Image (cartoon, coloured by chain):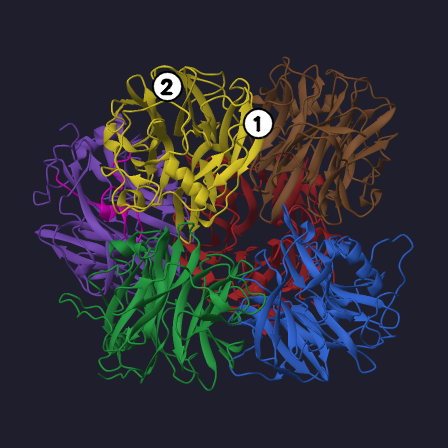
Chain colours: A green, B yellow, C brown, D purple, E blue, F red
Amino acid sequence: MNCKIIGDKCPDMPWEERPANCDRPLWRYSKNPIITKNAVPKCNSIFNSAVIPFGDGFAGVFRCDNDRRQMRIHAGFSKDALNWEIEPEPLTFASSPAGLNFEYAYDPRVCKIDDDYIITWCNGYESYPTIGIAKTRDFKKFDQLENAFLPFNRNGVMFPRKINGMYAMLSRPSDNGHTPFGDIFISYSPDLKFWGGHRLVMKTDMPWESTKIGAGPIPIETSEGWLLIYHGVLTSCSGYVYHFGAALLDLDDPSKVIARGQRYLLAPETPYERYGDVPNVCFPCATLCDSETGRLAVYYGCADTVTGVAFGYVDDIISYIKNN
Amino acid sequence: MNCKIIGDKCPDMPWEERPANCDRPLWRYSKNPIITKNAVPKCNSIFNSAVIPFGDGFAGVFRCDNDRRQMRIHAGFSKDALNWEIEPEPLTFASSPAGLNFEYAYDPRVCKIDDDYIITWCNGYESYPTIGIAKTRDFKKFDQLENAFLPFNRNGVMFPRKINGMYAMLSRPSDNGHTPFGDIFISYSPDLKFWGGHRLVMKTDMPWESTKIGAGPIPIETSEGWLLIYHGVLTSCSGYVYHFGAALLDLDDPSKVIARGQRYLLAPETPYERYGDVPNVCFPCATLCDSETGRLAVYYGCADTVTGVAFGYVDDIISYIKNN
Amino acid sequence: MNCKIIGDKCPDMPWEERPANCDRPLWRYSKNPIITKNAVPKCNSIFNSAVIPFGDGFAGVFRCDNDRRQMRIHAGFSKDALNWEIEPEPLTFASSPAGLNFEYAYDPRVCKIDDDYIITWCNGYESYPTIGIAKTRDFKKFDQLENAFLPFNRNGVMFPRKINGMYAMLSRPSDNGHTPFGDIFISYSPDLKFWGGHRLVMKTDMPWESTKIGAGPIPIETSEGWLLIYHGVLTSCSGYVYHFGAALLDLDDPSKVIARGQRYLLAPETPYERYGDVPNVCFPCATLCDSETGRLAVYYGCADTVTGVAFGYVDDIISYIKNN
Amino acid sequence: MNCKIIGDKCPDMPWEERPANCDRPLWRYSKNPIITKNAVPKCNSIFNSAVIPFGDGFAGVFRCDNDRRQMRIHAGFSKDALNWEIEPEPLTFASSPAGLNFEYAYDPRVCKIDDDYIITWCNGYESYPTIGIAKTRDFKKFDQLENAFLPFNRNGVMFPRKINGMYAMLSRPSDNGHTPFGDIFISYSPDLKFWGGHRLVMKTDMPWESTKIGAGPIPIETSEGWLLIYHGVLTSCSGYVYHFGAALLDLDDPSKVIARGQRYLLAPETPYERYGDVPNVCFPCATLCDSETGRLAVYYGCADTVTGVAFGYVDDIISYIKNN
Amino acid sequence: MNCKIIGDKCPDMPWEERPANCDRPLWRYSKNPIITKNAVPKCNSIFNSAVIPFGDGFAGVFRCDNDRRQMRIHAGFSKDALNWEIEPEPLTFASSPAGLNFEYAYDPRVCKIDDDYIITWCNGYESYPTIGIAKTRDFKKFDQLENAFLPFNRNGVMFPRKINGMYAMLSRPSDNGHTPFGDIFISYSPDLKFWGGHRLVMKTDMPWESTKIGAGPIPIETSEGWLLIYHGVLTSCSGYVYHFGAALLDLDDPSKVIARGQRYLLAPETPYERYGDVPNVCFPCATLCDSETGRLAVYYGCADTVTGVAFGYVDDIISYIKNN
Amino acid sequence: MNCKIIGDKCPDMPWEERPANCDRPLWRYSKNPIITKNAVPKCNSIFNSAVIPFGDGFAGVFRCDNDRRQMRIHAGFSKDALNWEIEPEPLTFASSPAGLNFEYAYDPRVCKIDDDYIITWCNGYESYPTIGIAKTRDFKKFDQLENAFLPFNRNGVMFPRKINGMYAMLSRPSDNGHTPFGDIFISYSPDLKFWGGHRLVMKTDMPWESTKIGAGPIPIETSEGWLLIYHGVLTSCSGYVYHFGAALLDLDDPSKVIARGQRYLLAPETPYERYGDVPNVCFPCATLCDSETGRLAVYYGCADTVTGVAFGYVDDIISYIKNN
């Protein structure tokens, strides 16, 4: 293994070896989807969700659209990170800044910094989308912080440690609608409350990501740089196709792109990715990885309907980025 | 049974009991789809169609798009309301008002008032959509009446009896295209020719119906009010999703909404609803119900391609509306 | 004079002879605009307004957008039909059908049938545009009737007498926005409440009216047919241009077009038509005419800002229609 | 056989007899899809591709989108026209006119005229789509000629012989995007370099082709006229549906349409046509046919993802066109 | 005078008394426009510009689009605030944060806090609009700070003192284009570098401001609250109309709106507001006011072409807001 | 004079010296507009028109939209090139290729090659715009040739001599509508019938031309290269602005741009350019120039309503291009 993951071991993470006929850097779990709407009552779909090691098992925050088609996020727990107990009720905040009322929440990410688990998500503020932030230590009591930015923003993704003494977050400024544009920017904060030092990280580039891109899981620290898995969207003549992409960012200044894969990592192919409430969507939101073996499990939303997992080696993916 | 259906018995209507693992107010017939394009020669698809008890069996009017993709409606007959003989030729009118020429017809409904079966549909007039009306007594000879409204209108649905001495019709004013807006209005007529007293019944509301709503089957008279099953459309980031919804309207003034379900009744889930000429469509157009048992069968178009049936109890649905 | 106006004399109507160098069927009043926002306090603009002989002078209903830019209609009176006293407050209704609340009102027309003055206008209903109707005998007390149609409609224009025992109204079905389409239809009513027998009168045709057309003043009855002056809109590469057009309709069946002018009658040319809140608009809303001399005065909105008058002879205009 | 194919025998072309229950003029190969992305490494999809008899077997040019989602064309060879060896690298040009650089290439067609195989495709020029042309004799060395037209154009399809001494090409002028319009035109050239004499052949017509039409395979010369198979697109309320259509063109003046089928030949129905990167697409690009038996095999792209074959008799199709 | 301006005297500010026939809260300078493109060589237009007392006269920052139609800002000086000497070259920065390159600059505002003059403007960053910030003490040497926000933002307007120890800025989040939406938000910063505590101040409301609103001049501190003059845009059927509006914000928490005028303060009326590069624009960007007399001069862009001034009394305007 | 015009003397061309206060490369004729709609009966506007020396005076082809708003071209004659006699009837063709019927014609150019005057214009073909061509020797008898290109194209402008033995034409491929895009291409022909060798000349570049560009007058041959005056369009937040631009093209290969002015030559400023049927349009279509003095007169359409002239020196303009 040439490239070393800088982080914890995770010996109990899920794993399946690469199938014999597969020459791609990622392969799907054979029992996908791992989570369907049946995990929560009165639920329409569970997808675009985030997991993380917690205690002697795993915890997560899940996007569960209910059968009013309202967008809500729920906490959940698992021993093996494959079979999940998801709370039947959406998570609520023990405290919130004055003036921030709950409207809707979707596409959560979870990041551990020191002893805190920091949740970020697309948060409705005065009916406009921006980046919400909350802290928890036990996935039961959540305290909401100030929204990171003015509207309109989506896909806010924290780095898992301070960089040059500052919290750092990727995000995708956008507008008031699902309009087809968006690039990835980085912003810094001394205190998770005031944000500045905004810089562009990446614009859309190759055809598979030509419409818009957005950060996916929390970036993975490696000896080569931050490994960023992201989604890239192509507009076909009749709808969108969401792919996984990957890039390597400078450890000290993540606005510098060291390498960026010209090829997608994964594209919709199976029935559960090809059709559902939004056809042709693979949307990565979280990873588990083990610094000892270099194994990686990517959790991703499928067709805005169910949740799947794909496996790979961090090492392979970084080679793939550099060589393609 | 708390809520009484005001209407005829229908002991021969199709029925299947609720599957063991189902906690929803409606469940699909296990042999869906019941009608495919094979029922009519040179046909592209049969969907969004209406059935009604007739003689000692059932009759119906079916939307059969042909392989020119022209939209036509055909009469049909059945003994069991599951296996249908559909006329190979579109229905034609024995008489029509001067100036109304046939252009296209889609999404029919059938309503019995006194001895007449009244057909309403989306009718092309000068190439614009409005609500066509016809009468029949035998489903063989149809006499066309005046169009109910000026263009642009769709989803005209009659009430099954006069209200305060007037014919009453729900409809959805819209524009010259499949543009994403539309609310439900009610209008009255002394004679099925002149229409007025137009009132709003419901606007779009919950997320699953946030784009547009339109009346579905003929409203069902109950001791609690008129049970209206309707379709509600959500615009995802890459297309529409059509759900069933339900509401309860005042018996004497149906523009008053007594209760309205915040949750959908049914959403696209099976392959025959998920893909077809228009993916993710469940479009209810007719019901059969039995006043003795409270059983309900909803006939609905699936993915603008085939026709399915779902079952439930009127009583359950009204509870579901009130409690959700 | 070959063509006879069927109607009253109006010897006191405003008049200016045709300028020497003018070869067009209509010519502008040399003191245009005759009405500006100064006629009403806290007013933004007065345009698209209707006048009619009344008592020993004239009365009218005026579109006065206020400085909230709300659209309101005001009554007004004049001795000479050029200098107007406009009520400082919008008109209100002494009675209204239950369920119809005032939202907004614009582009009024006034029609006399027997002893009643009937006002029609574009009326906000549930925030959607449709045709409002009211009656008055003194331009002080107005009683609102039912809206004529379902939304979405604009430019409702009554005929000045019953036709075959029915009230008749032209209108332009449209959608929920200023979108660029619209044709003229006719509808009938036995009682001003229930409307039916809808027929197409004219679609858009020549380039100057290729985007949309809408009826203008109350049609003028002549020995040759109904003279209809209407507006026709062309979409340039950077905005709209509103022209006057004219057509002749059959006296007994006005859905039959006897003749229609291929050339516009009047197009924006003067500064007060060229610029204002909406540049390049000439929008005819009312006429005065004198059956003895054949003189015609057309009242029209200029650039959605002020009100002007143009003069001509009915005879000339009908010749112009027939010859062009 | 009433209608005679004017052309070579092709006894080794693939064939399956019509299934018993099929009454359509075309039927699908039972082992479809015949080509998937697995035929080429790092490939996303292989579709909209062209084949032709070559030597003692077959050759072809294939649209292979790679996993950058770049659009490229590759040469390929087969003994049986079902199992294909496709070159792993895109084809390149031994020579090109100065100023023409490779940008992208898609939807190729292959035509044999005298001893040359002429390839046409949608060619990126200054990032705009137009019709590229190349010649080969061995499918190894390709020489690029001038683009046939100015941008914006797609679906350039040669006739397989000169007509009145001129090369002839069908094409679909369009714009810089996948916008929903397009008709079929014909153009002539004395030398494959300069083009003129442009004439309309067909506009969109029936509902199944109401959005846009484009020529498909090289027209087939028959005793009745040129048989043109083309694609016709309908815009549903939530996306496109691509069908096969067919028409018969005059042998001497192909801008004259002798007959045109009002019904589609084939519409998306199987899972591999219903879903993929673009749902509901059947896109015909090439045929093999045998003048002795009248057999026809149509090669077509399925859902912009894989390649399929359908079979029929030329005779039947021409009857179908004339009778429908 | 009921309402007291909290701020400096400005006895030399320009002034003209209210014309006799004017009953509006603001009136135009009789010699408008005061600045045209002739003030700068190779200039297309000078508008949407900011002025402030400086030394014994006045200084300003001016939007000067050049004859490449590039958007640039220039410093300028004046003795009387009516006749301006504008630097022929755009202003440049003595220092800038790494990574911020000049792209374009428009619609500047100037604010004095302690001894610094702080310039904010719409700043191009990676070709996207956001809020740029710079400091100067002499209007000759300008030091650029970090951009305040991620793209996409416009109309960033500072408060003229810290509030609760924090810098405060109004802005209008928007998207990558001149698309018709936008509300006013407030954000805070401890250091002009990191920003947070984002709250909504006002959404669009009355018809004259129904499309979008944006803060105009630096808010004026009064005994009643912050007087905010802003622009409100209405979309007519053929373009935009930009008006002045005004509101009163709470001194300690400016996200609280104490009063807001339902009527516009000023609307396009004169030729230099009615036509130019963008017709029908009055765009306020700066004020001068004198705490002794309560006099106010509003500097505003006219038709995106020239610069004008309007006069009024702060007292009157606040009454106007409260009473309308 | 550094730069020599290669061409004829034209001592009788109109001329006015540069006004004292003007530092621009072009200045307007003090008596503009020179042609209004009054020159032709039943005319709406005369603009975007072409003139050329002819006999002992001048001839021209004029865009005269009539009062049906149909777009037509008329021949005209003048002694001084300022006062024009325009034929009251549109020009017609003595002969036309079979299949080409007259639909509409606009924006003509006139070019002399050898003894022929070649007219090009935007020609309606099957209701789509493309480039029409005709020849005349006397401006009385015109023979129509084949359209140069497939739809969709506009602004076809010939070079005034063969280049490398070929006719050459600039044009702007576009789409079926006034949509905002367009670059300039060049094409060649051996015979004015067949066209090929298509190459890009220039794309949109500076802000004033960022939406679309199109060739204007016939290029002027100079010792430095071809001087091309063209129009460049900027999209403001509320409409278009059309400017003049200029570039210098290589004499032997005009697809090579030697120099291109970053600044516009002329922008709308006067009332007759600011308002009219399309506000803010300066559209150059023809020049007269005198090789002895280097004087240039540019004929241009103003606001799509009238025709104006601007003067300058070829030498100055080329310096301006090179220096800006």
The magenta span reads: D264-290
Q: Single out the mark in the foreground, 2 or 1.
A: 2
Quadrant, the N terminus of chain D: top left
Residue E8 position within the rendered picture, expressed as x and y whole percent measured from the top left: 82, 77
**SS state under label 2:** loop
**Left/right of residue D258 with respect to residue E162 in the rendered view:** left
x 45%, y 42%: residue = B322
Residue C277 position within the rendered picture, expressed as x and y whole percent measured from the top left: 71, 48
**Left/right of residue C123 with respect to residue B51 in the rendered view:** right
**Three-letter code for the amino acid on which mark 1 is drawn:** Met
The correct choice, above or below, for D131 with respect to C4 in the image is below
Residue at far right of view = E20
Can you tell which mark lies on residue B92? 2
Magenta-drawn stretch contains B191: no
Frontmost residue, E219 versus B127: E219
**Three-letter code for the amino acid on which mark 2 is drawn:** Thr
| Badge 2: residue crowd in 10 Å (few <14, some 14–19, many ≥20) | some
Frontmost residue, D252 versus A144: A144
Frontmost residue, E38 versus E242: E242
Can you tell which mark lies on residue C218? none
In the rendered image, which quarter is residue D168 located in?
A: top left
Distance from the alpha carbon under mark 2 to that under mark 1: 28 Å
Can you tell which mark lies on residue C202? 1
**Left/right of residue B159 with respect to residue E172 in the rendered view:** left
x 29%, y 24%: residue = B11
Frontmost residue, D324 versus B291: B291
The subunit carrying tag 1 is C
**Left/right of residue C20 with respect to residue D242 in the rendered view:** right
